[in-house]
Amino acid sequence: MRAGELHRRAAVDVAADHARRSNAEPSPLLSRAPSAINVSLAINILPLRTEIKQRVPGSPTRYYSFKLEITFCVRGVISPALANCALDGLERLLKEKFPTSRPLPSLGGKSPCVNLIRYADDFIITGRTKELLEGEVKPLIEQFLRERGLELSPRKTVITHVEQGFDFLGQNVRKYPNGKLLIKPSKKNVKAFLVGIRKTIKAALGMSAADLIDWLNPKIRGWANYHRHVVSKHVFHRVDHAIFISLWQWARRRHQQKSPGWLKRKYFERQGHNNWRFFGEACDNDGKPRKVHLLLASRTPIQRHVKVKGEANPYNPAYETYFEKREADYMAATFRGTQTLRFLWKFQRGLCPVCSLRITRLTGWRLHYRVPRVLGGSTSAENRVLLHPECHDRVHRQGISASLPRLPERGVQGA
């Protein structure tokens, strides 16, 4: 391809991209910031503008530069990666400028309590006082972003008290009068979720109950799993009730001449303590009829999230045991992960490959990769074994091989 043709195509692509974005709703990087003490700051980052030098194939000495505009799409895969590149170093800058061990005279000898919490292109910044955030933190951030071609949006830069609460990543963070700081699903997030559910139900007027359940279950499961780490149980019950109302209206529209008792018997049945569990009838792979039930958000167990260590690196061999333990804990809490652990336990016949003794719930266990992930080991079951916690430490400390033991003719039947 000649240089002129490359430059012309690049200009056409840029023009087409500008036309697409002019017809679509802008999607800037939105960063909302709370305060763990008493103040929070919300920051909006505009799209990043940069220059990319494209090398012309066949011309090793000639370079043509043209301007491209990189837009952070809300659902784009590239958005988190570009945001991490652009915002990398902000946390380090705040720690150097406002160390936790150095009190400030302007705060009466108290520490500034400036912290950054960031998830991809969303972040929050905390501070002790409103004056500190407005007078010192905000100018520092503006300078940091200006060097990277970014700027703050005055319309979306907000400073608010933590007792008033703020929304961040679809969840509301607020310190209540009783002194407790609670994180709950935000009202906007719940409303948007229910709006989508109602649209799905209204569009499925001609569908069977089983097909409608196949549409709704992934949405309910994904939304509930996202909020299962915070205070969500009460909200889950309200969402289940709202979905039930929409399903009852859907059934009434489908069968306008039928009585409520007939609708109840056709679409709802008793399951446990719930007398109104929505169900449908479908066929399995063998053609046999089976019942499918609607998932309930309130059935999702609340599990507190364990934060990953900031300095932990999955590609560093020093943290290999740390990430192995996190993965094992996660597998034990999921149905699919539990199936994998049971397979490994049965495959080893309940024996530890290092000491050839039984692995039980009392002894505990650790998940170990025979070929470390940092050395290219796979995540398949053939590369994973279950070890005693003590044997797992010996393997990493002494370099002992974790090959499968010689299994007896009759393995362990139970543990």
Image: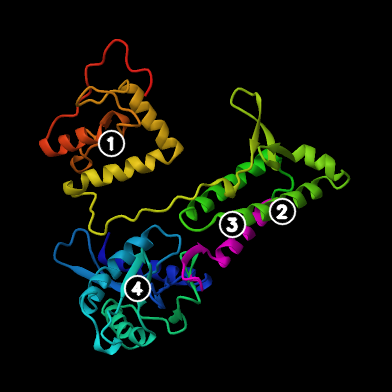
Upstream in sequence: badge 1 or badge 2: 2
Upstream in sequence: badge 4 or badge 1: 4
Q: Which amino acid does label 2 sit on?
A: Ser
Q: Label 3 near label 1: C-beta < 8 Å? A: no
Upstream in sequence: badge 3 or badge 4: 4
Which residue in the protein does label 2 denote?
246
Q: Distance between the residues labelled 1 and 2?
A: 46 Å
Q: Distance between the residues labelled 3 and 4?
A: 40 Å
Upstream in sequence: badge 2 or badge 3: 3
Q: Which amino acid does label 1 sit on?
A: Arg
Which residue in the protein does label 4 denote?
48
**In the shown orientation, is residue 149 left or right of residue 197?**
left
Q: Is 181 included in the stretch rendered in magenta?
A: yes
Upstream in sequence: badge 2 or badge 4: 4
Residue 228 appears in view: yes
What's drawn in magenta, residue-wise?
Answer: 175-202
Position of residue 405 relative to residue 227, above or below, is above
Q: Label 4 near label 2: C-beta < 8 Å? A: no
Determine which quarter of the picture holds residue 285.
top right
Which residue in the protein does label 1 denote?
366
Q: Which amino acid does label 4 sit on?
A: Leu
Position of residue 322 relative to residue 42, above or below, is above
